[in-house]
């Protein structure tokens, strides 16, 4: 027993001698306007970097079209990420992780992952999880700046917590064609714009002791192919649901490796491109039941039997609240209470991480069926965030990359 080992030696961990963040900028000719592609490279290939601890620094202004500050416009939750249509992380010229609609993807993933202890820290990234309508990252002159950890954007950066050896890396961001979804404004007919001044990639550069360096150099010299396993996040959208009570959505056909482990479903009713509607909130659409089918396998087994009008949502909240134990293997600490969940974030969290052996051969058809007790309202969209396994192999000697 450790409590009896009174003569135990003292161990000092000096394997890492330096872990300082270095700032990487986009190419000099890059503009940061709507629809622009922003590439931020790390050209040096003799580096040890730690993407898990890297972050984005974004600075800009929120202004009216006459370049004066707005008194009523503000960002929604994670609104700065809603300024982008796509973000991808590349190693050696290969796309390792790609997030389409990164704002909404990270909003859905964040709502099920974050806890109340993180709420205050996340305000520095543009999150206000207490739903305080007065919270804002913009000052009286329209200025804002945020630091956003890449571990809240990419599954690769969240799950793969090791260094990358001697590989050229690049972060690519594509601005959305409109910033309306990122903003909520209580003043009617007031047009606002977002002007970005800086987008910087802050990446830890790791220096190691001589003993550890010899080990790492040995891996490179022996032409070892290194593996990086992680869980990818893939958002799918059904842009306009039919105004009926029963719906079937054939989302996609997946390979065995990329079959879902979790599927998180949310609805938006008349929120897209509406500055008076908070795009970071979700609608329940009077949902009463939902089933996910992976080929013939069904999740969950029982019917949900929920009813929002009668406040019968305990089963739905239980599925949401238990995500953290299943995904992170830690105690459940949901960020929202049942009443907040019902009002702001009625998401359906389907845990399909334990699957039948029959799913291990051939492709997997992913199908969603759900039912409401009233016809779906006009202009309603459905989103499904699929979390699935990914495996990448790279060779630091030849700079080759294989995506399995």
Image (spheres, helix red, strand yellow):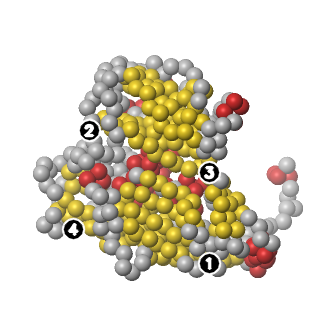
Against 40, residue 193 (above or below) is above
Q: CA distance from mark 2 to mark 4?
A: 31 Å
Task: Choose the circle earlier in sequence order: 2 or 4.
Answer: 4
Element carrying mark 1: loop
Asked if residue 167 lies left or right of residue 144, the reply is right
Secondary structure under badge 4?
Answer: loop
Q: Which residue is mark 2?
A: 270
State the residue at coordinates (58%, 56%).
Answer: 156
State which mark lies toward you, 1 or 4. 1
Residue contact between numbered discs 3 and 2, judged by CB atoms under 8 Å: no
Percent position (x, y) of residue 257? 65, 45
- Distance CA(mark 4)–CA(mark 3): 44 Å
Q: Earlier in the sequence, mark 4 or mark 3?
A: 4
Residue 247: image quadrant is top left
Q: x%, y% of residue 119?
A: 43, 51
Q: Quadrant of residue 225?
A: bottom right
Q: Position of residue 37 (x, y in %)?
A: 38, 67
Marks 3 and 2 sit apart, C-alpha to C-alpha, by 34 Å
Q: Is residue 182 above or below residue 69?
A: above
Residue that appears at 48% across and 37% down: 251
Q: Quote the CA–CA distance across marks 1 and 2.
A: 48 Å
- Which mark sits nearer the N-terminus, 3 or 2? 2
Q: 184 or 227, which lies in front?
A: 227
Q: Is residue 254 left or right of residue 129?
A: right
Q: Total of numbered circles in the picture? A: 4
Residue marked by disc 3: 390
Mark linked to residue 141: 4
Of labels 3 and 1, earlier in sequence is 1
Q: Position of residue 193 (x, y in %)?
A: 22, 62
Q: Residue at x 58, y 80 (%)?
A: 44
| Left or right: 149 in relation to 225 | left
Q: Which mark is residue 45?
A: 1
């Amino acid at each position: 027993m450790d409590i009896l080992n009174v003569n135990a030696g003292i161990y000092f961990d000096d394997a890492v001698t330096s872990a300082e963040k270095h700032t990487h900028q986009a190419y000099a000719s890059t503009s940061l306007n709507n629809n622009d592609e922003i590439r931020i490279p790390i050209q040096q290939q003799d580096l040890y970097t730690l993407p898990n601890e890297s972050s984005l620094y974004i600075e800009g202004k929120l202004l009216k079209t006459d370049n004066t500050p707005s008194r009523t416009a503000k960002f929604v939750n994670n609104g700065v990420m809603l300024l982008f249509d796509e973000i991808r992380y590349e190693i050696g010229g290969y796309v390792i992780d790609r997030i389409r609609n990164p704002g909404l993807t990270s909003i859905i993933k964040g709502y099920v992952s974050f806890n109340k202890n993180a709420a205050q820290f996340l305000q520095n990234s543009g999150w206000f999880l207490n739903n305080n309508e007065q919270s804002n990252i913009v000052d009286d002159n329209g200025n804002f700046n945020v630091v956003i950890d890449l571990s809240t954007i990419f599954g690769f950066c969240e799950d793969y917590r090791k260094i990358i050896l001697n590989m050229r890396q690049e972060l690519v961001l594509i601005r959305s064609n409109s910033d309306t979804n990122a903003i909520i404004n209580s003043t009617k007919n007031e047009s606002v714009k977002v002007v970005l001044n800086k987008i910087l990639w802050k990446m830890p550069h790791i220096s190691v002791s001589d003993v550890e360096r010899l080990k790492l150099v040995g891996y490179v010299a022996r032409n070892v192919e290194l593996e990086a396993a992680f869980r990818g996040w893939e958002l799918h959208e059904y842009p306009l649901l039919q105004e009926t009570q029963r719906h079937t959505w054939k989302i996609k056909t997946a390979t065995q490796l990329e079959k879902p482990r979790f599927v998180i479903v949310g609805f938006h009713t008349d929120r897209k491109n509406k500055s008076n509607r908070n795009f970071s909130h979700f609608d329940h659409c009077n949902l009463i039941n939902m089933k996910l089918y992976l080929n013939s396998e069904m999740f969950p087994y029982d019917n949900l039997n929920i009813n929002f009008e009668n406040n019968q949502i305990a089963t739905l909240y239980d599925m949401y609240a238990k995500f953290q134990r299943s995904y992170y293997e830690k105690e459940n600490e949901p960020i929202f209470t049942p009443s907040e969940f019902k009002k702001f974030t009625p998401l359906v969290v389907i845990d399909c991480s334990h699957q039948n052996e029959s799913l291990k051969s051939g492709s997997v058809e992913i199908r969603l069926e759900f039912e409401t007790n009233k016809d779906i309202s006009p202009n309603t969209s459905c989103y499904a965030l699929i979390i699935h396994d990914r495996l990448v192999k790279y060779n630091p000697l030849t700079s080759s990359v294989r995506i399995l």
